[in-house]
Image (spheres, helix red, strand yellow):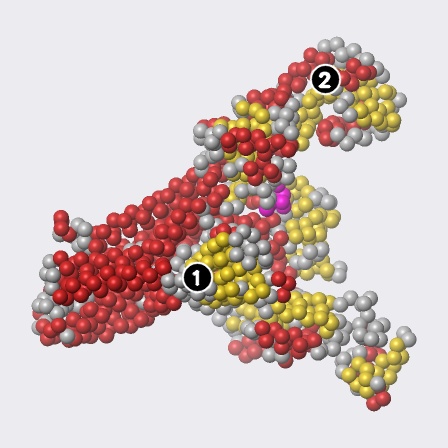
């Protein structure tokens, strides 16, 4: 019968097998001495109880990995790989996804090692991709060592490819993180006697940055080529002004012009290649853009000039002069403009780069009892991570053991380090101060708070503000309109213009094509939006969409939820008032002991208040909660009652002047609770939700900005008024049922006002959605709050002020840009067409038009960069 | 007006009309999305000087998977934006990048490169 050799997986005939073993009731056959030898050395590795029919035991864990695979271009590639792999012994399931370029392989690791799996994939003609890493190698000098190290790396299991660069002293390695760790790679290199260190990459962080760099260099080289050619071309075009050239005879000059005709060809088709390929590609899609304009303009100039040079007799006298200077100079300038624009664009994404830079690069995990340093991308959920003093926390997690103080200011703005102990949450990218601890990773990679913030900011930067859509619609029609204008300009000058008609007609038409700049219009909004949103993010304000940013600038009313927004949201013990000869601490001890068993939110405040004073609490007995009245319990033999006025009446406790004192407390915005012991009134404990320190300041700032502030709360009118008075709010909507919050926002909007709502994302969600702009105060790792348009990650109300300020500043910048881009075209086009000519004899030279066009988009991006100097009026420190 | 001027004028007007028609009025070819496994509408789009295809017909309410492969390095096309769905993606050269979302309401939704030079349209029925 056909059996499988458990060691090598080869299918053999049991009757001709080399050896036979029986182990744990199972029979095994081996193909060779080698295999049986391996089996004898460690039978348990190979001897598994397998199902008779499928060869797999459901009790043994299968391993499943997702491997990115290169070379999956067509569907048939995916199918080929899938069927190829399925045939391999040890593989249970293969799903190849061509769209994502990955293969999900479920296999039996004991029967098919990962290395053999990689070999199998390669045998099918595909290449598995792995993680990339760079390792710096110290003092790598000899070229032959390069080969040795590369071989060593490639021989390391799990390494797909490794290459060593002597020039940068770095090894670039592609490997499968499931099989190899960074430590193994380091060992491979160190085995040749070299010390390794994490690569100090002078390379740009991002692939995108690298691409930008390459593009920039390409554009600049194109510029220089065109610029250099422009010099002799200009000399021969404006021969009268150039000392040596002006003495040339017409014949020589004509010859020179023919030379320039040839010289400008490479300028057009090498330096200016982008314009032509771009225009052609656009044409195939039935659209036209800036490339179309430049390509047409320069081509028209070149063709006219060449015909004029070769067949001067066709043209009327004095018109057969070439315009090669237009071709060369315009291309040079526009290419330069594109290069500068690229540079300036890079600066607009600085905020994001700063955020990404906050991420830690490595993490120290404890796996199988061993501590090892790994790149942060390799940390898995559930890993135990060790953090030492002064280190950056790599990912989000929950502390398992140890404690410390953590500086979270980069994410939450809390200047005081937050103390963390077992069970507390820690956020990646924050800084550990003096303690050491271990935590379990709960969110890694894309799911960490930092990654979520980065994604939100990126999405927002790419969103469209309504004002941008308007600009977009215009750009859609713009270029063909310009082309039509150029045609009409030519016709007009040719029909009714002065002599030489042809020259004037052509020059003006070309100028019209060149001066129009659709790019500036298209860039105006996105660039400012990028910088504005980045600025917001820097100040702890995460704006989700461009639309939110635009709406926020026109906010007239800000509705603030009370609990958790204006106030801290956690009630705290504020007063203990005693009657007769009661001591405060004794009273508090009894009250807190009773409240220990209570689930009332205020109870926790009282218990906490007692703890802070180090008062020992006693376990109560006979606890009874009376809804609407209070609580009753027996503490230390005493009958203690805690509650409101109604409760005291029920207990028939005489309050005396306590009632007055309670009233005073209530007017102060506190919630007083009477305490009666053994039937007699003993005192009052008062609890209040303390106001955040900067709430008043923020509200004052909002009012100064001309915005009305309204408080919305489900709390009673009295407490609400007290708080409102303290923070400076005049309009209060109190005793609002949770379900009616959204309706109240709607009522305000019905007045025709733009309303913003500030609350926490959970309870106030409907109200946030109803408002024109919903701002949620987020805390901790809960960043992407769905219901809000803007998330304030620093829990302060000052964020609202800053959000509106950022919005106004950005919208102002956008309007400047749009205005500039619009005016530029609105003025430039008519002047190019010749509108000033009849009055002032002024015509726009195509050279100047080229310069203006090139620099108009740079100016727009430059102005957007100006927004980077924005500073909020109230800084949240 | 001389004969040449007459010809030029006529030619100019004709050219203007042609331009209007070519860029604005002429109907563009549409591509219908193929429905793949699991009811997911899949379309592969090449990005090279424009989006091919650039008019895609989709059914509403079904998940859509668009795979963009950028085959040029001009900085213009490095990002694709879907402003109506608040989605965007970087397109590194040569790498297929997939975007998924479900268009609920029928209508026309545009997508474009960052600067607006390259455009496409999703027609959701």
Same subunit, tags 2 and 1: no
Residues drawn in magenta: A779-784
Read off the residue under disc 2: A577
The nearer-to-camera label among 2 and 1 is 1
Read off the residue under disc 1: B77
Q: Predominant secondary structure in magenta?
A: loop
Q: Position of residue A561 (x, y in %)?
A: 59, 31
| Image quarter of residue A562 | top right
Q: Nearer the viewer, residue A569 or A438?
A: A569
**A555 lies left or right of A12:** left
Label 2 residue SS: strand
Q: Nearer the viewer, residue A305 or B22?
A: B22
Quick check: A596 above or below A646? below
Is A52 part of what is drawn in magenta?
A: no
Q: Position of residue A41 (x, y in %)?
A: 83, 77
Report the residue at 83% width, 21% height from top: A640
Q: Position of residue B80 (x, y in %)?
A: 47, 58
| Image quarter of residue A93 | bottom right
């Amino acid at each position: 019968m056909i059996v499988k050799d458990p060691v090598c997986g080869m299918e053999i005939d049991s009757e001709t097998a080399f050896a036979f073993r029986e182990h744990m009731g199972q029979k095994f056959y081996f193909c060779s001495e080698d295999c049986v030898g391996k089996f004898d050395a460690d039978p348990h590795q190979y001897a598994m109880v397998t199902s008779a029919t499928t060869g797999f035991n459901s009790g043994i864990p299968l391993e499943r990995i997702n491997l990115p695979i290169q070379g999956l271009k067509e569907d048939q590639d995916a199918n080929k790989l899938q069927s190829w792999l399925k045939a391999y012994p040890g593989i249970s399931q293969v799903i190849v996804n061509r769209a994502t370029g990955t293969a999900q392989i479920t296999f039996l690791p004991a029967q098919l090692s990962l290395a053999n799996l990689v070999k199998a994939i390669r045998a099918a003609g595909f290449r598995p991709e792995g993680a990339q890493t760079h390792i710096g190698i110290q003092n790598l000098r000899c070229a032959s060592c390069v080969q040795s190290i590369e071989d060593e790396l490639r021989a390391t299991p799990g390494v797909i490819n490794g290459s060593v660069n002597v020039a940068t002293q770095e090894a670039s390695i592609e490997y499968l993180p499931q099989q190899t760790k960074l430590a193994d790679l380091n060992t491979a290199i160190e085995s040749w006697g070299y010390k390794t260190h994490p690569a100090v990459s002078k390379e740009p962080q991002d692939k995108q940055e690298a691409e930008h760099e390459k593009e920039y260099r390409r554009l600049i080289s194109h510029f220089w080529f065109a610029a250099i050619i422009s010099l002799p071309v200009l000399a021969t075009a404006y021969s009268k002004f150039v000392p040596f050239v002006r003495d040339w005879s017409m014949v020589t000059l004509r010859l020179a012009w023919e030379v320039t005709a040839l010289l400008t060809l490479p300028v057009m088709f090498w330096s200016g290649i982008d314009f032509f390929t771009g225009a052609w590609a656009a044409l195939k899609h039935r659209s036209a853009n800036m490339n179309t304009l430049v390509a047409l303009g320069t081509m028209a100039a070149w063709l006219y000039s060449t015909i004029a040079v070769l067949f001067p007799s066709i043209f009327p006298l004095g018109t057969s002069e070439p315009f090669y200077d237009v071709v060369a100079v315009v291309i040079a300038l526009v290419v330069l403009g594109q290069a500068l624009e690229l540079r300036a664009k890079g600066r607009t994404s600085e905020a994001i780069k700063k955020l990404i830079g906050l991420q830690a690069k490595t993490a120290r995990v404890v796996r199988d009892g061993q501590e090892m340093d790994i790149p942060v991308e390799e940390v898995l959920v559930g890993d135990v991570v060790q953090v030492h003093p002064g280190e950056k926390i790599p990912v989000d997690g929950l502390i398992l053991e140890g404690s410390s103080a953590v500086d979270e200011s980069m994410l939450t703005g809390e200047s005081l380090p937050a103390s963390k102990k077992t069970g507390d949450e820690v956020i990646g990218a924050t800084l550990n101060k003096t303690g050491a601890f271990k935590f379990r990773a709960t969110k890694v990679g894309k799911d960490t708070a930092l990654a979520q913030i980065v994604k939100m900011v990126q999405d927002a930067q790419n969103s469209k503000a309504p004002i941008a859509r308007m600009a977009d619609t215009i750009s859609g029609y713009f270029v063909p309109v310009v082309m039509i204008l150029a045609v009409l300009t030519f016709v007009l000058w040719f029909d009714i213009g002065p002599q030489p008609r042809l020259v004037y007609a052509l020059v003006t038409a070309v100028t019209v094509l060149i001066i129009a700049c659709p790019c500036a219009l298209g860039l105006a909004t996105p660039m400012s939006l990028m910088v504005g949103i980045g600025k917001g993010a820097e100040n702890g304000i995460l704006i989700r969409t461009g639309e939110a940013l635009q709406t926020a600038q026109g906010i007239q009313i800000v509705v603030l939820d009370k609990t958790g927004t204006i106030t801290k949201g956690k009630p705290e013990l504020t007063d203990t008032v005693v009657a007769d000869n009661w001591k405060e601490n004794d009273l508090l001890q009894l009250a807190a002991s009773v409240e220990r068993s209570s689930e009332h939110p205020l109870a926790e405040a009282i218990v906490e208040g007692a703890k802070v004073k180090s008062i020992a609490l006693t376990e109560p007995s006979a606890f009874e909660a009376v809804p609407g009245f209070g609580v009753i319990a027996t503490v230390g033999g005493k009958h203690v009652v805690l509650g409101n006025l109604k409760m005291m009446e029920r207990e028939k406790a005489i309050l005396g002047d306590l009632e007055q004192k309670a009233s005073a407390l209530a007017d102060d915005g506190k919630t007083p609770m009477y305490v009666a012991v053994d039937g007699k009134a003993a005192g009052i404990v008062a609890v209040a939700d303390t106001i955040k320190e900067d709430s008043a300041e923020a509200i004052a700032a909002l009012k100064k900005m001309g915005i009305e502030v309204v408080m919305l709360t489900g709390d009673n009118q009295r407490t609400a008024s007290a708080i409102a008075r303290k923070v400076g709010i005049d309009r209060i909507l109190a005793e609002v049922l949770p379900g009616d919050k959204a309706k109240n926002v709607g009522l305000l909007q019905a007045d025709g006002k733009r309303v913003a709502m500030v609350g926490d994302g959970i309870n106030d969600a409907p109200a946030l959605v109803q408002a024109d702009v919903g701002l949620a105060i987020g805390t901790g790792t809960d960043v992407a709050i769905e219901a809000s348009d803007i998330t304030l990650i620093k829990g302060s109300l000052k964020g609202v002020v800053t959000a509106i300020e950022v919005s106004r500043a950005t919208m102002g910048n956008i309007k400047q840009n749009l205005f500039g881009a619009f005016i530029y075209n609105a003025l430039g086009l008519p002047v190019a067409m010749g509108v000033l000519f009849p009055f002032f004899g002024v015509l726009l030279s195509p050279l100047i038009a080229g310069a203006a066009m090139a620099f108009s988009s740079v100016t727009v991006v430059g102005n957007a960069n100006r927004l980077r100097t924005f500073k909020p009026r109230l800084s949240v420190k | 007006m001389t004969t040449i001027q007459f010809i030029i004028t006529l030619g100019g007007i004709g050219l203007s009309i042609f331009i209007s028609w070519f860029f604005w009025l002429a109907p563009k070819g549409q591509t219908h999305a193929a429905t793949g496994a699991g009811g997911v509408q899949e379309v592969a789009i090449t990005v090279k000087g424009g989006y091919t295809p650039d008019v895609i017909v989709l059914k509403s309410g079904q998940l859509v998977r668009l795979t963009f492969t950028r085959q040029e390095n001009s900085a213009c096309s490095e990002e694709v934006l879907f402003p109506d769905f608040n989605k965007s993606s970087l397109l590194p050269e040569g790498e297929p990048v997939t975007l998924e979302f479900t268009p609920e309401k029928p209508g026309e939704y545009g997508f474009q490169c960052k600067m607006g030079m390259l455009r496409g349209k999703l027609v959701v029925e």
